[in-house]
Amino acid sequence: MLQRRKLNMKIHIINASRKSPVKANSSAEELKILCKQGRLNEALRILQSANGTLDSSVYVTLLQGCMKKKALSEGKLVHTHISESGFMRNRYLRNMLVKMYSSCGSLTDARRVFDQMPVRDVFSYAVMIAAWARHGVGQEALALFNQMKNKGIKPNHFIFASVLPACANMAALDRGMEVHEEIIREGFHSDVFVQSGLVDMYAKCGSLENARQVFDKMSQRDVVAWTAIITGYAQNGQGVEALSLFRQMKTDGVKPNLLTFTGVLPACANLAALEQGMEIDDEIVRSGFRSDVLVESALVDMYAKCGSIKKARDLFDKMTQHNAVSWTVMIAGYAMHGHGEEALLLFRQMQQSGVRPDHVTLVCVLSACCHAGLVDKGREYFDCISKCYRITPTMEHYGCMVDLLGRAGCLDEALDFINNMPIKPDASVWVSLLGACRIHHNVELAESAAKHIFELDPENAGPYVLLSNVYAATGRWDGIEKVRNMMRERGVKKKPGCSWVEVNKQVHAFLSGDRSHPQMPEIYEKLDRLSREMNAAGYVPDTRFVLNDVEEEQKEQFLCHHSEKLAIAFGLIKTSCGTTIRVIKNLRVCGDCHSAIKFISKITLREIVVRDANRFHHFKEGQCSCGDYW
């Protein structure tokens, strides 16, 4: 009765501002029309006057209206009316109630309705499993799936389409493959919705080969399937293939939707493919999705990661609404470009706007302090994580602080910080300290940090290379040989340096010492000319970054053929004077390349933007935006 009184009170308020009446043959028809028009509050008034004379289809319409508006309180009022009208025996309505509660974010209410069902059919389980999966509670979804089968209820295509996202969200590849086997046994492997779910599951579990096999066998591919495979490639670092599939999708006549655009934009971002990103931005405008906050946030992220921080900020400022994601991607953009003060100013504006930062936002804030050398500010914000924002610091926050202190030369403080962590530091934290030792040539501490890393993550090649760099910088060739032997014994292989450059909407990749590109003779000729001009301008190769104990001339030759230099030379050959060259590298730019690119920017009068594994470097007129603090 309390719910009924609340309903009466709500309707009394609504009556005072009711829109023009809707003509209809009956209250039930009028109610349905109001729901379709999104006038849910007015529909509630009709519900009150109906006095239990409505049929179940009207309640379905009302619940759908509540789902569309995420109107939990109104949904509860409809639930009360259903109960008082004697319709709770209707299993379909019970299923709809479960769906309504889960859509409105109340899993507790959804599970309560589900548990109170005297009889549950396959659709009851499908709705509840989908609810758990949609809210990221994969274990519960899988447990319910097993419970359903134990009760002798055979799964159908709705069940499989609901349980696959649970496996995907948990990255539970083995369980997902078991479900795939069940799908084949039950004969649903040709269902388009199930196939799309399989593509999505395999992609999110990192098994692109399996995802592609399912995708290629589909007789018809809808936008869901295309979006799943495109997003999968983009999220697994294969942006070139993601963009190729995006083009193929359109060639096949499938129109991209909002999720397709948010899925493909990270491919442009990861490749720094600005031209293709701008082309997709134009498509988004034509498709009418530009005002969606998720799409706008993805665009801000894309422009920032493609090196166009000004364009990212312009778009951010034009957004009609900002959520935690949009604030965070813009702060992250400033951080990776080394604009620490701008990032912190934006963070203060975020707080003033009433949007609460999450743990990712605070990682970006600490990263901004790190790249800009704002040590005191970094300490202050780290202390605020738990005190001001009531967030428990994660390993990422601790890693950022070690990086911040280490880069600034506070190595003893960084070590004390690690030793006093309330949680056991993982390999990433020690890698931050090892990286600082490389910068400041501290061999003893580097060896200590490396020892911890090799125990925690012995198969990661990066720390071995970092330690070798420390030895090389101090002439310790015996140390380098020791590291090489360790890598051989453990079967660890060094990740080759690779750089990408976009020219005429096409991305070209180069490996260090690469000779596979069809225009390689021209590229090496260009590098030779640049080397002569650079030497005349005062450039001296820094051979400390060569990890081979060979003659100086050979060391200089090794340095000349680093992947970023090959990519820049190709960009200079293929673009007109004055065009900005944008390069990304999978590893940290070495000190020699950093120095060389400053000379190249001055000699060629070009702006060269390089994004390495840590941050952006904007080279112009012989200077770098990082101020050599990196």
Image (cartoon, rainbow, N blue to C red):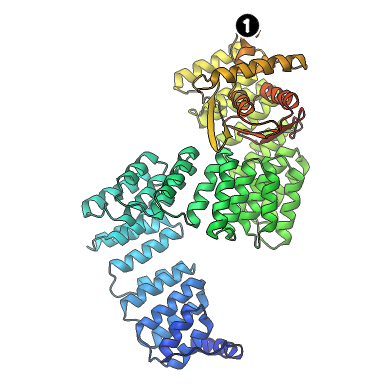
Q: Nearer the viewer, residue 544 or 583?
A: 583
Q: Residue furthest front?
A: 576
Note whether 408 is above or below 246 in the view shown.
above
**Residue 457: x %, y % from top left:** 50, 31
Identity of the residue drawn at 53% across and 29% down? 509
Q: Quadrant of residue 396?
A: top right
| Residue 585 in picture, x, y percent from top left | 59, 31
* Residue nearest the viewer, comparing 233 with 580: 580
Q: Is residue 421 visible?
A: no
Residue at the image position 46 percent from the left and 46 percent from the top:
246
Please state the total of marks drawn on the protein image: 1
Query: Which residue lies under the disc numbered 1?
Result: 551
- Give the amino acid type for the residue marked by disc 1 in the picture: Glu
Q: Residues within 10 Å of mark 1 (few under 14, many from 20)?
A: few
**Residue 24: % across, % down:** 44, 90
Q: Is residue 429 above or below residue 351?
A: above
Out of 33 and 371, give the one closest to the viewer: 33
Image location (x, y in percent) of residue 573: 62, 25
For mark 1, give the secondary structure.
Answer: loop
Question: Residue at the location (74% across, 35% down)?
Answer: 625
Nearest to the observer: residue 564 or residue 516: 516
